[in-house]
Image (tube, helix red, strand yellow):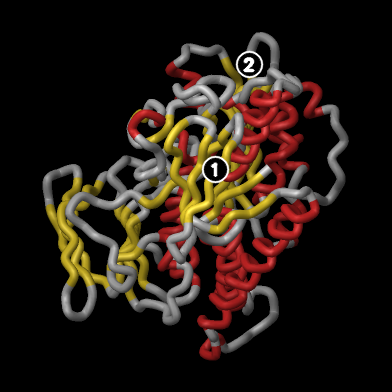
């Protein structure tokens, strides 16, 4: 067993995505809590001494520690690591070129491609790492910009909006679609937008980016709105967060190139590409671009290639999480999707403002929204906005996987006082409609 990697072990999520951003989010929330909640909680502190470079340094240390853990696991499980760039001249062969230009040839019956994805660029706008940023540069800025413009209001855009707004940037978010976090339930997106606007973030939905201009002192972004009006936004930096595209270029020889659709490798239910013996998993095969999805896809791909299991990936059970504050967590169908599919359903909601643990923690913003089938009572979808809901979500993913009904969730004893009681109470509320 061998792994070819040209950068740090652990991939983008561990080194330049999920993990370091969560460290930044933790520290940003701490700053926000001290600044905005301190007096209400009987505390007062001066945040003039915030040392942002140390915040960034801590996030890098966390990523580095976990990357070393991957290295240890590889050694313990007899996985040989080759540092370099991979090229597949034909099925069954991988050429690895290291930094010195030396080539090592590996042969194997099966090849699993997990090259991930990279940030998409706006047409005509090239990231320079100084004024025009991708998420990679945004997480290692050594100074907090006074003004930051973010193009794209998906999970990445909103997490960075929260981070930099919390530590003092004037943040403006530009989103072409009607709602931030467009894949989430509209009720969740609308409520989160209201909360973040109150915190000082300027959010402009239904707004299209027409032009990005780098100036001597920063950037100018021209946007148009739904009514046809235009505005020029000025900032110190602009972060482009409009999605990703698969890393497929230069990876295969023409004769060994699998079918590629919209910048991603096309695979079957066994995760094998159109070239026999070449499998692929993770962001390189397309959405949803989530680390936990990539991990499960890779497990199933390996099971399939060795014939130890014939299970398939269930994309109806994908947990979705956004880690701004309040957090967003979801699984299954949104209410809009239920209507589009003409399903007969019931909705139960419970506000965290009525939850004892949430109030005691000064975290009353948000709610739990559960959608159940009217006929059988099974859980169709769960959508939550609030403190630590990304951790609460696992209960609902498991409930959906096991086809739990509304009555079974209601009759399950939830410890008191906990945030999880809101799940039980939301399920109970669905029975009153």
Q: Secondary structure at mark 1?
A: loop
- Quadrant (top left, top right, bottom left, bottom right) of the C terminus: top right
Please state which of the two labelled residues, at mark 2 or mark 1, is closer to the viewer. Answer: 1
In the depicted view, which residue is nearer to us: 398 or 76? 76
The furthest residue to the top: 375
The kind of secondary structure element at disc 2 is strand
Q: Residue at x 33, y 32 (%)?
A: 254
Mark 1 or mark 2, which is nearer the start of the sequence? 1
User: Residue under circle 1?
Assistant: 290
In the image shown, does 304 or 19 lie closer to the viewer? 304
Eyeballing the image, is 299 above or below 2?
A: above
Instruction: Return the residue nearer the eye: 252 or 312.
Output: 252
State which quadrant residue 364 falls in: bottom right
Give how far apart the Cα atoms at labels 2 and 1 are. 27 Å
The residue pinned by badge 2 equals: 373
Asked if 298 appears above or below 80 in the picture, the reply is: above
> Percent from the top left, x then y, of residue 410?
79, 28
Image position, residue 429 (x, y; %): 69, 29
Q: Are marks 2 and 1 in contact (CB under 8 Å)?
A: no
What residue is drawn where x is 12% and y is 51%?
Answer: 229
């Amino acid at each position: 067993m061998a792994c070819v990697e040209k950068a740090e072990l652990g991939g983008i999520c561990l080194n330049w995505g999920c993990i370091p951003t969560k460290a930044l989010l933790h520290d940003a929330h701490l700053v926000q809590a001290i600044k905005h909640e301190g007096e209400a909680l009987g505390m007062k502190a001066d945040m003039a001494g915030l040392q942002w470079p140390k915040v960034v340094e801590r996030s890098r240390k966390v990523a580095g520690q976990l990357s070393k853990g991957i290295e240890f696991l590889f050694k313990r499980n007899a996985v040989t690591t080759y540092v370099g760039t991979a090229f597949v001249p034909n099925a069954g062969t991988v050429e690895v070129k290291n930094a010195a230009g030396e080539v090592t040839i590996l042969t194997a019956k099966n090849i699993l491609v997990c090259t991930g994805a990279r940030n998409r660029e706006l047409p005509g706008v090239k990231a320079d790492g100084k004024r025009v940023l991708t998420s990679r540069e945004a997480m290692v800025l050594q100074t907090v910009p006074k003004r930051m413009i973010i193009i794209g209001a998906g999970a990445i855009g909103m997490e960075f909006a929260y981070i930099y707004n919390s530590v003092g940037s004037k943040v403006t978010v530009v989103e072409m679609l009607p709602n931030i976090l467009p894949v989430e339930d509209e009720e969740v997106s609308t409520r989160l937008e209201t909360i973040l606007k109150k915190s000082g973030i300027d959010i402009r939905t239904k707004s299209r980016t027409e032009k990005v201009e780098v100036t001597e002192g920063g950037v100018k972004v021209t946007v148009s709105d739904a009514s046809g009006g235009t505005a020029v936004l000025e900032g110190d930096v602009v972060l482009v967060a409009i999605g990703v595209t698969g890393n497929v270029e230069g990876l295969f020889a023409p004769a060994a190139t699998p079918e590629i659709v919209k910048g991603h490798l096309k695979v079957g239910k066994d995760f094998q590409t159109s070239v026999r013996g070449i499998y692929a998993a993770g962001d390189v095969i397309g959405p949803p671009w989530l680390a936990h999805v990539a991990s499960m896809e890779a497990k199933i791909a390996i099971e399939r290639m060795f014939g130890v299991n014939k299970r398939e990936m269930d994309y109806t059970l994908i947990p979705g999480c956004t880690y701004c504050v309040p957090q967003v967590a979801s699984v299954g169908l949104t209410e809009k999707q239920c209507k589009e599919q003409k399903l007969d359903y019931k909705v139960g909601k419970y506000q965290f403002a009525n939850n004892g643990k949430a109030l005691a923690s000064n975290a009353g913003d948000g709610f739990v929204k559960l959608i159940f089938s009217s006929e059988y009572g099974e859980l169709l979808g769960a959508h939550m906005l609030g403190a630590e809901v990304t951790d609460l979500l696992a209960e609902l993913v498991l409930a959906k996987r096991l086809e739990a009904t509304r009555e079974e969730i209601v009759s399950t004893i939830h410890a008191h006082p906990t945030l999880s009681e809101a799940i039980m109470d939301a399920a109970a509320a669905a029975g009153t409609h």
